[in-house]
Amino acid sequence: MADAIAEQIRVRGLVQGVGFRPLVWRLAQAYALRGCVGNDAEGVWIHACGSAAQLDRFVRALYREPPPLARIDAIERAPLAQLDFSVREFRIVDSRAGAVRTQVAADAATCADCLRDVFAAGGRRRHYAFTNCTHCGPRLSIVRAVPYDRANTSMAAFAQCDTCLAEYRDPADRRFHAQPNCCPHCGPQLWLELPQADAVRAAPLRAVQQRLRAGAIALIKGIGGFHLACDATNAAAVAALRARKRRPAKPFALLARDLQMVRRYCRADAAESALLTQRAAPIVLMARGGAALAAGIAPGQNGYGFMLPATPLHHLLMAELDVPLVLTSGNRSGEPQCIDNVSARALLGPVADAALMHDRDIVNRLDDSVVRVVAGRAQLLRRARGYAPESLPLAPGFAAAPPLLALGGELKSTFCLLKDGGAIVSQHIGDLHNMAASGAFEQSLTLYRRLFDHAPQLLVVDRHPLYRASTIGAALAACEGLPLETVQHHHAHIAACLADNGLPPDTAPVLGIALDGLGYGADGTLWGGEFLLADYIDSERLASLAPVPMPGGEQAVRQPWRMAFAWLYRLFGGDVATLCAESGEFGAYLGGRPLGLLARMIDNDFNCPQTSSCGRLFDSVAAVLGLCRESSFEGQAAMALESCASGAAPAAVGGGYPFALETGTALPRLQPDAMWRALLDDLQRGAAVEVIAARFHQGLAGGIGRMVDHLGDVCGARWCGRVALSGGVFQNALLSELVLHQLRRRGLEVLQHRRVPANDGGLSLGQAAVAAARAIKNRSG
Ligand SMILES: [Zn+2]
Ligand SMILES: [Zn+2]
């Protein structure tokens, strides 16, 4: 071959443990190249020898058809003088021990080829629940250590049979180096456990299907945790599940066999259908449409959260069922999902009638991810199975930052490792004031640091001194002798939105609108309805929602009626009799409460912290309208209010309620007093609650628009004209769309969340981005 040249080709991105080397091998055969391919610390390297045209075609093919779980960030080519031209073939070279930079892919839903294997007549994996290949199956849920080899996963307990081993060793096979490769002869097994009875080992799937059809509640061990399941069309079964799980109101997630089954109950537009069928297989929140399921599935909600089967086990389970299943995490209220058979058995009897178990250990707990289409785009609400721990690429400027670790907030906690210009955000771990979740947080932190060989030079926490993550961070910093940086809660929210949108570390200040539950403010009060002029380095509070007292502090979070009383007490002064008379049916409800005591607490500023929280304002309106007066889960009142507003006929809504702009004070305030008066008038007139809820949403969005006009004038040239929306309140699709409309018609560019949640699940990314940008700025002087 006279015109043969040699090149070193470097592929960067998520290219290890995803079948990249066999793909290179196959393409090298196809283009008649000689040489070798291997993994090293920077990704995949290729030495290839052939004609220039063949090499070009080979590289184009790499870009065009990477393996399903791979992500190519860059392919770099350089001439190679030293290739041994006597090499006659193309070889896969083993990884050099210790040199490989770990990349752990996310767990991926069963691929089409494996699904065919599971249902094909006569195949050796027919009806086998643990079928997988290089393109699908478990990853993070089974890995204990690096490198990602079988010996370091919970598949180590299962030696491959000769047939599986042959597949595993053949570069031409779809299961080449598929670490969890197995078959019915050598892999994990299923069985069904029953209270006070012997386990069912023959046809356990058929046995659990029979029980589910008969209305039983079953525990099902999945890929990243246990679920509780029951027939979603059986009201008695759903009610029993709620009672036994002590979960009165929070919506249950649903599992459907296929898209067709989803469309019996939801409209599922093109974007939503695409999300349902993607390899992460998240729960997708969608509006109802068509037949109804049992009333207890999602009380007070106008939508359902559906997912499709993510594993062969779930495909097999659904194959013989003609109804969707409730599929909710297998735990007791407030605790993290069980992952081991022993703790799951503790639920057998008191909560479940049967448990479908298997003998593969779940190493890392992964909740189901939740996603919603907001204003035409997918937004993650909970990022876990199928997404974590894939690195989120940041703007190139972040590569100059030192490795650092950010520990997030208290609710919906995640942590974030920042390194080499990428952010690795952990899966959703849960609310850290629960001790078990706190333990899981520390375990995951240890695992991630090991998996990603991460040695932080800096730790970052929320400014709240009592957050569990803040104390863990302080202890870690002390123990490892590292500096500890704090970032204000809402600054972190806005920074998360900037990082999520790929803005560089030196980006110009945006107007950040952070609307959420409660965050510790720079002045020691509780913020949550904030307008900030913010870049990564700094943030300045420009305005907020008018603050009100929270009577009883934390108690007011669980009892939205208290927040409503605080607003009305402010409106009517001390005249509680008029307050009750003017607030319709809510007045009668309040009549039975200790209002004198509450009024004295407010007057004496006793256990009544001030808050500008927008989440608490939603709570108050929901309470007055009778949608939610006592809350059993976070966000319940706000979700009920959004659902209610979405049911209003647009023609009936007209305009929104007035929100005033108070600009005479040092800090401008969005002031809802006039909104409350208009709302109470509507109530007195007997207007439909849907219409009132919709007018509230409209009015708030309008008020935000006018506040942005005002602040834009105040900021002048300091503001770049961009607005960033963050905080849990922006999970509300209706409010998001109304605010977007307000801002876009003013010609403003609006940034919203996509890859990390707008809620506190995104905080760790924001904290990491702030600390990274500050470190870069300090270095450059
Ligand atoms: Zn597969
Ligand atoms: Zn086998």
Image (cartoon, helix red, strand yellow):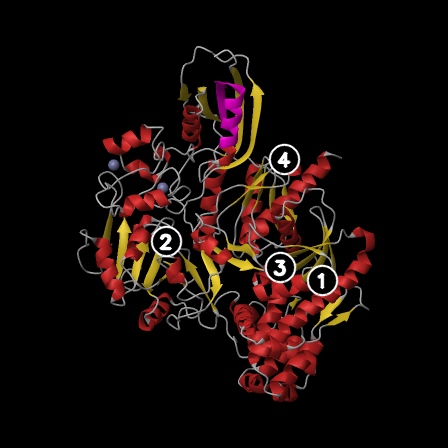
Structural crowding at the residue carrying mark 3, measured as other residues with C-alpha within 10 Å and reported as few (<14), some (14–19) or many (≥20): many
Query: Which residue bears the numbered disc 2?
Result: 309
Closer to the N terminus: mark 3 or mark 1?
3
Q: What residue type is labelled 2?
A: Pro
In the picture, the disc for residue 399 is 4
**Mark 3 secondary-structure assignment:** strand
Q: How far apart are marks 2 and 3 (CA)?
A: 37 Å
Residue, x 51% and y 27% (percent of image)? 57
**Mark 4 secondary-structure assignment:** helix
Q: What residue type is labelled 3?
A: Gly
Query: Which residue bears the numbered disc 3?
Result: 519
Q: How far apart are marks 1 and 2 (CA)?
A: 41 Å
Q: Can residue 185 be seen in this view?
A: yes
Of badges 3 and 1, the one in the foreground is: 1
Of badges 1 and 4, the one in the foreground is: 1
Query: Which residue bears the numbered disc 1?
Result: 745
**Mark 1 secondary-structure assignment:** loop
**Mark 2 secondary-structure assignment:** loop
Of badges 1 and 2, the one in the foreground is: 1
Is the residue 492 above or below the residue 88 in the image?
A: below
The residue segment tinted magenta is 42-61
Q: How many marks?
A: 4
Structural crowding at the residue carrying mark 1, measured as other residues with C-alpha within 10 Å and reported as few (<14), some (14–19) or many (≥20): few
